[in-house]
Amino acid sequence: MRNGSGEADVREEGVPALRLAGLRKRFGRQHAVDGVDLVVPSGSFYGLVGPNGAGKTTALSMAVGLLRPDAGSAAVFGVDVWSDPVRAKALVGVLPDGMMLPERLTGPELLHYLGRLRGLPAATVDARAEELLAVLELDGAGDTPVIDYSTGMRKKIGLATALLHAPRLLVLDEPFEAVDPVSAATIRTILRRFVASGGSVVFSSHVMALVEQLCDHVGVIAGGRVLAAGTVEAVRAGRALEDVFVELVGARTGGQEGLSWLAC
Amino acid sequence: MAGVLSGTSPAAVLTGMKLAVLRRSMSGPRAASLIAGGACGALAAVGTVLLGLVDFPTPEAGVGTVALVLLVWTVGWAVGPTLTGGDPTLRLSYFTLVPQRPGRLALGLLAASFVGVTPLVSLVAFAVLVVLGAGFGLLPALVAVPALLLQLLFVVVLGKVAVQGLGGVVRSRLGWELSALLVGLVCGFLNTGWFGIAFFLRLLGGHWAPTVGTVVRALPSGWAVVAVDAARRSDWALAAACLGGLLAVCVLLFALWTVLLTRWSGRGTAGGGRAAVRRGGRLRGVPDTPGGAVLGKELRLWARDPRRARFLRIALWTGLFTGLLPLLGGFTTVLPWTGVVVALYAGALGSSLYGLDAGALWLTLVTPGAERIDVRARQSAWLLVVGPAAVLLTVAGTLAVPNGWARPWLLAVLPAVLGAGAGLVPLMSLLGPAPFPDRPGGQPLDGFSDESGDQARLMSLAVLLLQLVAALPAAGVVLAGTLLHSAPLCWTGAAVGLGSGALYAWWLGRAARRRLAARGPELLDVLRKGVRRAAEPEAASPEEQERRDLLAGLSRRRTALAGLLVTVGVLSVAPQGGVALGMSLLAPENRSWFLALYLPAGWQVPVAVGFVLLGGGCFVGVYRLIRAKHAAERAAELPTGC
C-alpha cells in the first residue's frame, strides 16, 4: 500500500517509526502530559492504553504536529515533527480525536481534495479513493455530504483520509470508538494488512481486549506519564493485560457506594 | 432534574440561571459587545424619552410621533433576534428533557427574558409614556405606568414569538432566503435609508399623514400611548380598552409561543434540512493542481454551506438596498456604488472564513506545506464568488445612472476594496478566529450569539473599516484629479486602485499564510474549543490567578473603553465625517442627522474633516489599547512560560 511519499532517505533499519522524548504539556494547573518518553519500533502495531484523561490524546496530538508541546520532542522515522514539519508530515497519516471535517463535501470530494492538496496526481488520487471507499464500504454514500454521515462512517472516512497518501506511520486516536462490530472488523483487517506490508500503527484505546488481540507492542499511560511500555508479552508477563492495567493505574473499581435513592 | 423545576418556580430558577450566565460573560469580546450595544441602546432610549418633553403643536401630533417611535422599537424587538440569533444564554435545547409543562417552562423562560441589557434599555425608552402622560396631567401619568409595563411585556413576548417562529422558518430554504433579505434590508436602511428620509417625511407630513397617524395608533404597539392620550381626554372606556387589549394581545402571543415551543420540543434537536448534493465530479474550469483542489472545495462550500450562502445573500441584499433605498428620496448618487457595498459586506461577513471550518483545520495542518496553497485558494474562491457580482452590479448601476463623474471613482475604489477583501478575509479570520462548527441539524443562526459571534462581529467591523481605509490611496488620486480638473490623473486612480488591490491581496494573503504556518496548532485549539474555553486555561497557582484577575479587571475596563472608541470612531469617520463631507459637496440641502450640514457653508468641510480626524484618533486609541494589552499579557506570561 505504500509508495510515493518521499521517504527514500528515512528507510534505515533501527530508526523508530515514532520517538517521543520528554514531551510535556500543561493546561493551566493540570499537567496533561508530564514527561512522556515512548519509542514505537518501525513495523510495529502499537497500542496506547490508559484511563480517560490519561493524556493519550494530548500526547498523540503533539506527536503529529497538531498541538505544540511545552517541552520535549517528537520524531517520525528520525525526522523531527516540530523542526522539519514538511518532511515529517509526509510520512504520517493521522486520525485525530473528535475530528471535524469539511461537512458539506461528499466522501469522494473530500478524498480528491486532500489527495491533490498533498500533491498526488489526480488519477492516482481518484483510483485510491475509489478503492478505499469500496474497502471501507462507503462507496454507497458517494452523494451524501459528510454532515449526514453516522459516527461509524465518519471514523471510516477519517481513516481513508489518513491512508490516502500511503503514509509509513498511522497515528490513530480511538479509531474503534463508536464503531459497530462489522465496521470495526473491517478497520482491524485494513490495519493488519497495513502492518503486514511494512507499515507502523500507533493507536489509542481503552479496550484492553482489542489491544491484546491486535498489537505486538503496548504502552500504558496514566496521569500524563508512561507507566509501562514494551512488547505485549513483556508488559503483561503471563497475566491478562486488563489485570496489569488496573494494577498499574492503581484504580479501584468504583460504583459501589452511595446512590441509595436510585432504588425503585 | 425533575425536582429542580417543579419544586420551585421555573421563573426563579431560570432567572437565576440567566443572571449567573451573564455574570460569567462579562469579559472579553462578550463584554465589549454588551457594552457597545448597551451604549447605543441607551442613547436611543434617552432620545425616545426626550421626545416626551418636545413641545408638539398639538397633543395629537405628540401622540402620533410617540406611537411611531414605539412602532420602531417594536419592530426592533421582532427583527433584532433574527440578526443576533436569539437568547444565547438559555437555549431551548437545554430544557427539552425537563419534564415540565410547556406553559410553565414558557413562563419561566419569559421571566428570564426580562433579565438583560435590552429589556432595561427598552424600559427606559418606554418611560416616554410616563413623561408624556405627566405633561398631560396626573391621571394620564398614572395610566402611563401600567401602559409602560404592558408595552414592555408586549415587545418581550413578541420577540420570543418572532425568534421561535423565524427560527423554524430559517430551517427551510425559502425561510433563510427571506431572513437574509430582511437582514439586508435592515443593513441597507441603516446605511442609506436616511437618504430616503425626505420620502418618509413626506409620508408623515403630506396627505398621507392622517393615514400613517391612524395606522401607528391602530397597531398594538401604539395602544399604550393611545391609552395615555385617552386618559388626557378622560375617555376612560378607550383607555381601559387599550390596556385590556394590549394585555389580551400579550396573552395571545404567549399562548402562540407556548404552542411553538411544544411543537419544537416534540420535533427534537436533530433533523433539519438535508443538504442536497448533486453528483459532483470535478468542477469544470478549476485547474487540476493542489491549489485547484482547495479552490474547488472552497467553491463547493460557498455554494452548499447554508451559512456561507447566507452571508453572500446578505451582502447582496445589503448592497442592493443601500443603492436602491435612496431612490425613494430621489437620490441616484449611491446606485452605482451597489457593487462596492456588496464587496464591502462580503468581506465583512467573510471575516469568519476559517471559523466556519472550525476544527477541520487539522486537515490542512497535517498536510505538508499546505498553508500557502490553502490561503491562496481561499482568496481566489472569495474573489471568484464576490468579484463578478460586484463588477456586474457596478456596471449595471453605472448604466442605470449615467453620471460620468462616478466612473473614475468606481474604477479606483472597486478593485482596491476587492483586493483588500481577498486579503483581509483569510487574515482576519486567522487573527481573531471565531469558530462556528457546522453541526448536523444546526440552524444557520446558531452560534452567532455566543463569544464566537461577538468575536466575529468585531472582526467583521474591522474588515469593513480596513477595506474602506484600503480604498483611500486610489480614491485620493481621483480626488486630486477632480480638484485639479485633470482627467488623466482621475483615470490614473483606476490604475492605482488595481495595483493597490493586487498588492493588498498578495501582501495580506502572505501575512495570513505566515500566521497559519507559525500558529497552526494554537489556532486549531481555538477553533476546536471555542473562543472562550481556549483563551482561558485554569490558573496554575493562587498567585497566577491573582495576577490574572488583575489583568482581567484591567482588560474589562480597556474592553469597555475600546468598545466606546470603536463606536465613536465609526460614527465620526463614516456618517459624520466621510458621508457628511460628500453630502456637503453633492447635496447640502439634505441635512438629515449630519451635524456639519447644519453649519454655515464655510464651516461644513472643516467640521466634517474634523470628525474624520476625531474618528481616526479613536482608532489609534483602540490600536494602542490592543498593543498595551498584548504587552501586559506578555509580561504576565513570562514568569510561567516554559
Image (spheres, helix red, strand yellow):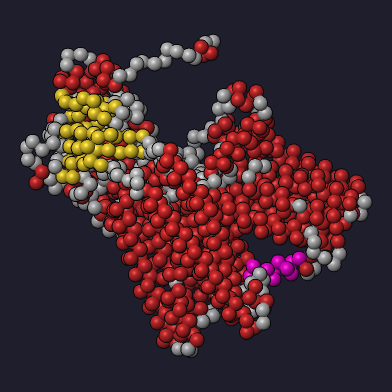
Can residue A67 be seen here? The reply is yes
Q: Is residue B489 left or right of residue A217?
A: right
Q: Position of residue A152 (x, y in %)?
A: 34, 31
Toward which corner of the image does residue B191 lie, by quadrant? bottom right
Q: Is residue A92 left or right of residue B50?
A: left
Q: Position of residue B295 (x, y in %)?
A: 33, 55
Q: Is residue B205 above or below residue B598?
A: above
Toward which corner of the image does residue A71 lie, by quadrant? top left
Q: Is residue B543 above or below residue B186?
A: above
| Magenta span main SS | helix
Q: Is residue A247 above or below residue B29?
A: above
Task: Determine the residue positioned at 25% across, 56% down.
Answer: B289
The stretch drawn in magenta includes residue B629: no
* Residue at the bottom extreme of this rendering: B485
* Residue at the left extreme of this rendering: A13
Task: Determine the residue positioned at 46% across, 84% down.
Answer: B480
Q: Magenta part of the protein: which range?
A: B194-204
Task: Determine the residue positioned at 71% across, 40% down.
Answer: B253
Image quarter (top left, top right, bottom left or bottom right) of the N terminus of chain B: top right
Label count reads 0
Q: Is residue B261 above or below residue B480?
A: above
Can residue A92 be seen here? The reply is no
Q: Is residue B255 left or right of residue A97?
A: right
Q: A212 or B101, which lies in front?
A: A212
* Residue at the front extreme of this rendering: B543
Q: B478 or B290, which lies in front?
A: B478
The stretch drawn in magenta includes residue B200: yes
